[in-house]
Image (tube, rainbow, N blue to C red):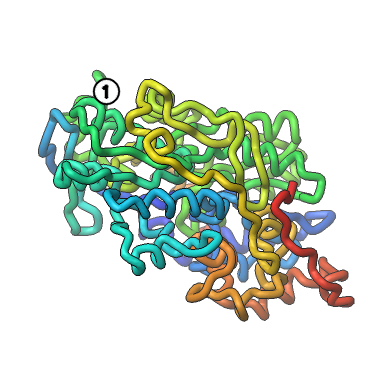
């Protein structure tokens, strides 16, 4: 129920209804982006964003820098073996 | 970065496994860690994480699957709604096979009720637009992860003035459930793996009471195998350093204050119920959401007459004890015999995120039983009859 899938927003299809197309592992589907847009980050700025998709909604944006830092830490741990 | 495969790399997993093993050797006593979220339970079994952990680290599977904690009475209420001849009842697939007191939604569908599985609450709204002569009722359930999507759907229905759409709201909140667990003297836990996607909405700040008042560490975790292993490693570090803090392993998506847009939508549409019944945990104050009176036209509980009865669980089912983490699924006397995913008696066997279904599907029972059974001598040595389930388990 609480599972989410990462995907990348590739197109805004309906600004009024805040609908976008997200690419999830090569499969494109429509999602609602209400949870990730505001005045600082309007719909048109969402193209290219990586988001967590859950029940047809983009719930949050993924932070690439944080992800990279986590992976670097794990890389260091693995290298210490 | 695709945010999936990178967090499944075997070399990094092996590095973490060795670090966890090394730290576990410094533990003075065996520890129990509860993963709150059913999504974590599913991942832990899917990737065999429990199997590779040292023997002195036990994972307890908590009450974080909304299907598993759904009481029978609410299922009966849902079925009562869908049996109105003019209703199209829509639901996520997870809820279809959950047994009510007499039947499930799937059986009700077979008997003629118009019940449709949807992927999103917005699909349900579209069905309402396509069927103006019908009443469409969406079975809204889930934790704070799902609540924003249902809130936005109601806001859209209100904006478009759609009058034949409503929700049967069963959203639940994770913080009151954790509080109830922590107040339960039966439960002996050393730390929590916190729910990643709930935290994506509520943030990490609401967990501070766990560290400050109950002196338990909690690490909010992602769902890939490296996420979960790293979270266990972080918990071990806290325990060995006598720290009790809220830490965030899933910082690629979880911020301390959560998602303010999603929270605002939840608060606009929903308010907390004075109490809500949880399977296994009984009534918990302010643990469920209901639709605010401003949006009463979208509240199925206002539109339809529902039985609103409390129904006892099957006597043989011990989902209550399993959801509280005081029993392992295989210790339930009907596990794998009378209760299977094909013929579930309890909700923990219905949902793929339920602990019983995960044990049943992914097996490895002989390995896991060897790891944990010696710590439960009463059950292993005497084979005493197990306690029966009751309506009030708190």
User: With B76 as the anchor, is B182 left or right in this view?
Assistant: right
Local secondary structure at mark 1: loop
Specify the subunit that label 1 lies on: A
Which is more toward the observer, B297 or B123?
B297
Which is more toward the observer, B248 or B187?
B187
Residue B243: x %, y % from top left: 73, 37
Residue B104: x %, y % from top left: 45, 63
Q: Which quadrant holds residue B275?
A: top right
Residue in the picture at 45% in, 30% down = B258
Residue in the picture at 79% in, 69% down = B386
Q: Which quadrant holds residue A48?
A: top left
User: With B231 as the anchor, is B240 left or right in this view?
Assistant: right
Can the viewer see residue A52 in this picture?
yes
Task: For the C terminus of chain A, give its image quadrant.
Answer: bottom right
Residue B313: x %, y % from top left: 64, 59
| Residue identified by numbered label 1 | A38
């Amino acid at each position: 129920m609480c599972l989410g899938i990462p995907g990348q927003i590739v197109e805004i299809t309906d600004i009024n209804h805040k609908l976008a197309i997200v690419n999830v592992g090569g499969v494109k589907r429509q999602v609602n982006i209400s949870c990730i847009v505001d005045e600082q980050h309007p719909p048109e700025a969402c193209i290219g964003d990586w988001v967590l998709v859950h029940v047809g909604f983009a719930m949050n944006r993924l932070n690439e820098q944080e992800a990279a830092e986590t992976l670097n830490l794990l890389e260091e741990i693995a290298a210490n073996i | 970065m695709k945010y999936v495969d990178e967090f499944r790399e075997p070399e990094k997993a092996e590095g973490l496994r060795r670090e966890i093993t090394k730290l576990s050797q410094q533990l003075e006593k065996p520890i129990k860690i509860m993963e709150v979220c059913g999504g974590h339970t599913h991942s832990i079994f899917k990737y065999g994480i429990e199997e590779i952990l040292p023997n002195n680290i036990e994972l307890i599977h908590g009450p974080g699957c909304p299907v598993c904690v759904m009481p029978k009475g609410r299922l009966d209420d849902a079925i009562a709604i869908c049996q109105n001849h003019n209703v199209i009842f829509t639901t996520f697939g997870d809820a279809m096979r959950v047994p009510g007191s007499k039947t499930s939604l799937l059986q009700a569908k077979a008997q003629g009720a118009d019940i449709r599985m949807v992927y999103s609450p917005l699909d349900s709204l579209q069905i309402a637009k396509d069927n103006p002569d019908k009443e469409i009722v969406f079975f809204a359930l889930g934790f704070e992860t799902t609540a924003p999507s249902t809130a936005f759907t109601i806001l859209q229905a209100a904006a478009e003035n759609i009058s034949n759409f409503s929700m049967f709201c069963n959203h639940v909140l994770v913080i009151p459930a954790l509080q109830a667990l922590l107040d339960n003297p039966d439960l002996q836990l050393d730390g929590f793996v916190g729910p990643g996607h709930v935290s994506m909405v509520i943030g990490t700040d609401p967990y501070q009471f766990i560290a400050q008042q109950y002196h338990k560490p909690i690490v909010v975790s992602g769902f890939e195998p490296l996420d979960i292993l790293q979270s266990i490693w972080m918990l071990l570090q806290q325990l060995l350093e006598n720290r009790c803090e809220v830490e965030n392993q899933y910082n690629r998506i979880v911020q301390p204050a959560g998602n303010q847009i999603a929270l605002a939508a939840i608060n606009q549409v929903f308010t907390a119920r004075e109490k809500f019944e949880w399977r296994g945990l009984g009534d918990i104050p302010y643990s469920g959401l209901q639709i605010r009176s401003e949006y009463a036209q979208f509240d199925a509980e206002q539109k339809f007459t529902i039985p609103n009865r409390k129904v006892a669980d099957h006597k043989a089912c011990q989902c209550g004890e399993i959801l509280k983490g005081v029993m392992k699924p295989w210790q339930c006397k009907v596990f794998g015999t009378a209760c299977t995913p094909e013929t579930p008696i309890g909700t923990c066997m219905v949902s793929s995120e339920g602990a019983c279904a995960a044990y049943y599907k992914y097996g490895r029972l002989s390995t896991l039983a060897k790891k944990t059974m010696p710590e439960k001598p009463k059950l292993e040595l005497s084979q005493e009859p197990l306690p029966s389930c009751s309506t009030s388990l708190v």
